[in-house]
Image (tube, rainbow, N blue to C red):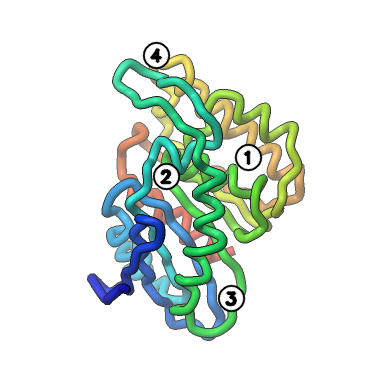
């Protein structure tokens, strides 16, 4: 069961809250955005204000953030953090097999391409998805947690299941200015993975934004999605 709310069609699948903001283009460009809270509506508004009405945005909330977005188990990386429980593969199955078909019933016309975007851990998840499924043709990792232990080694040693055509990476220019031994590597790791994507023949945009990890999150996310739509 579902219903319309705040301009989008809402329903639940496996306790995940899905909102579909339908576009008005004859061909379906669909971007999926995993969210930690209620930021999906703000991102959609920013994109519509930019004049981007030629795509459908699907936001997914109600996630168990440190599980659904995590590729494998990891202990906490700081004193106030939770442990990571590697549930990304299980959530990818739900996303690909259940959420995508249900959401795309609301998409006008045939699907031209699908994008997957996310901020922080969801940015890590977007990059990881390419190694596990073929569903997404463009990805955006905005302030992605690419510092995640062993992820760079994983990216270098594994083949992608579905090679995206386009990949967007961005960071705040102060995100690596931290005493945390993991997170202070985020710029180095992000730039290494962006370079790897270029070597693989993928069109890449890498952008630095002013500020730390928590500045202008919705605006940064909208910028990444807007790039995916423009290329």
Is 63 drawn above or below residue 55 in the view shown? above
Of the two numbered discs 1 and 4 on the same chain, state the one appearing first in sequence: 4
| Residue corresponding to mark 2 | 119
Q: Where is residue 226 in the image (x, y as percent from the top left)?
A: 47, 61
Alpha carbons under labels 3 and 1: distance apart: 27 Å
Of the two numbered discs 3 and 2 on the same chain, state the one appearing first in sequence: 3
Is 27 drawn above or below residue 186 in the view shown? below
Residue 122 vs residue 206: left or right? left
Q: Is the C-beta separation of discs 3 and 1 under 8 Å?
A: no
Of the two numbered discs 2 and 4 on the same chain, state the one appearing first in sequence: 2
Question: Farthest left residue?
Answer: 6
Alpha carbons under labels 4 and 3: distance apart: 45 Å
| Residue corresponding to mark 3 | 111
Determine which of the numbered discs, if any, sits on residue 194 in the image: 1
Q: Which of marks 4 and 3 is in front?
A: 3
Q: Is residue 144 visible?
A: yes
């Amino acid at each position: 069961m579902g219903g319309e709310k705040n301009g989008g069609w809402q329903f639940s699948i496996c306790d995940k809250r899905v909102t579909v903001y339908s576009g008005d283009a004859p061909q379906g460009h669909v971007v999926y955005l995993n969210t930690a809270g209620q930021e999906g509506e703000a991102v959609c508004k920013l994109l519509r204000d930019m004049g981007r009405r030629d795509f459908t945005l699907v936001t997914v909330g109600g996630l168990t953030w440190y599980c659904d977005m995590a590729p494998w188990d990891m202990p906490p990386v700081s004193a106030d953090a939770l442990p990571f429980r590697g549930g990304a593969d299980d959530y990818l199955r739900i996303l690909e097999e259940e959420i995508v078909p249900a959401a795309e019933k609301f998409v006008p016309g045939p699907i031209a391409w699908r994008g997957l975007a996310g901020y922080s851990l969801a940015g890590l998840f977007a990059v990881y998805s390419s190694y596990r499924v073929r569903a997404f043709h463009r990805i955006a990792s905005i302030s992605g947690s690419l510092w995640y232990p062993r992820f760079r080694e994983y990216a270098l040693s594994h083949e992608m299941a579905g090679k995206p055509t386009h990949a967007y990476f961005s960071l705040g220019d102060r995100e690596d200015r931290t005493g945390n031994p993991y997170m202070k590597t985020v710029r180095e790791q992000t730039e290494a993975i962006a370079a790897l994507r270029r070597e693989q023949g993928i069109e890449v945009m890498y952008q630095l934004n002013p500020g730390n990890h928590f500045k202008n999150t919705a605006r940064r996310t909208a910028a990444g999605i807007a790039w995916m739509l423009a290329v």
